[in-house]
Image: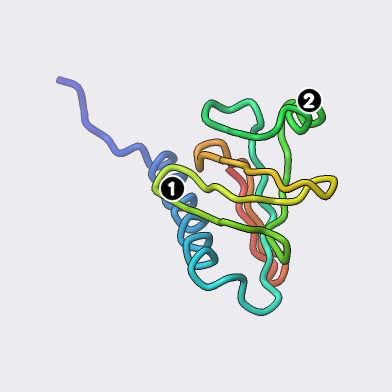
Amino acid sequence: MAKDHFNYPALMDAALRGIVRTVLEQTAERGTPGSHHFYLSFRTGFPGVEIPDYLREKYPDEITIVIQHQFWGLEVDAEKVSVTLSFRDIHERLVVPFAAMTGFADPSVSFGLQF
């Protein structure tokens, strides 16, 4: 008989990604409080990631974006975050599944996570 067990690494990963989701949900509702701002790193080739082709060509493996003063239309659901950022003075919509994220940081409070 196979012994059931908990997959603690997967549970921990899901919990940590839940922290990122909650922070981004609150930011979508209220904006960034005080000096808070976020660095969000993700795998550009991950299924479901939507970024402009020129960014994927420049960053074929991973990119880090900053959510601080100039971001628009931040939307968060259970699976992904969507946000419009400015690149070369052009507004671009990005869609990032939480599963694609490799890191999250809020330098204003020296907080960071690696996935």
Q: Is residue 81 above or below residue 2?
A: below
Quadrant for the C terminus in the image: top right
- Quadrant where the N terminus lies? top left
User: Which of the pair 68/39 is nearer the observer?
Assistant: 68
Q: CA distance from mark 2 to mark 1?
A: 32 Å
Residue at 55% x, 47% y: name it. Answer: 82
- Residue mark closest to the camera, 2 vs 1: 2
Proximity of marks 2 and 1: CB atoms separated by less than 8 Å: no
Position of residue 33 relative to residue 13, above or below, is below
- Mark 2 residue type: Glu
Q: Residue at x 71, y 75 (%)?
A: 35
- Position of residue 58 measured from the top left corner of the image (x, y, whole percent): 82, 30
Closer to the camera, 103 or 89? 89
Residue drawn where x is 72% and y is 27% of the image: 53
| Residue 75's disc number | none
Q: Which residue is mark 2?
A: 57
Tell me which residue sits at (52%, 48%) in the image.
81
Please provide percent x and percent y for residue 11: 38, 44
Q: Provide the residue designation for mark 1.
A: 12
Name the amino acid, label 1.
Answer: Met
Determine whether, in the image, residue 115 is placed left or right of residue 4: right
Element assignment for label 1: helix
Question: Residue 42, image x and y in percent?
Answer: 64, 39
**Number of residues whose C-alpha sits closer than 10 Å to that of mark 2, classed few (under 14), some (14–19) or many (20 or more):** few
Secondary element under disc 2, as helix, strand or loop, is helix
Q: Is 107 situated left or right of 114 in this image?
A: right
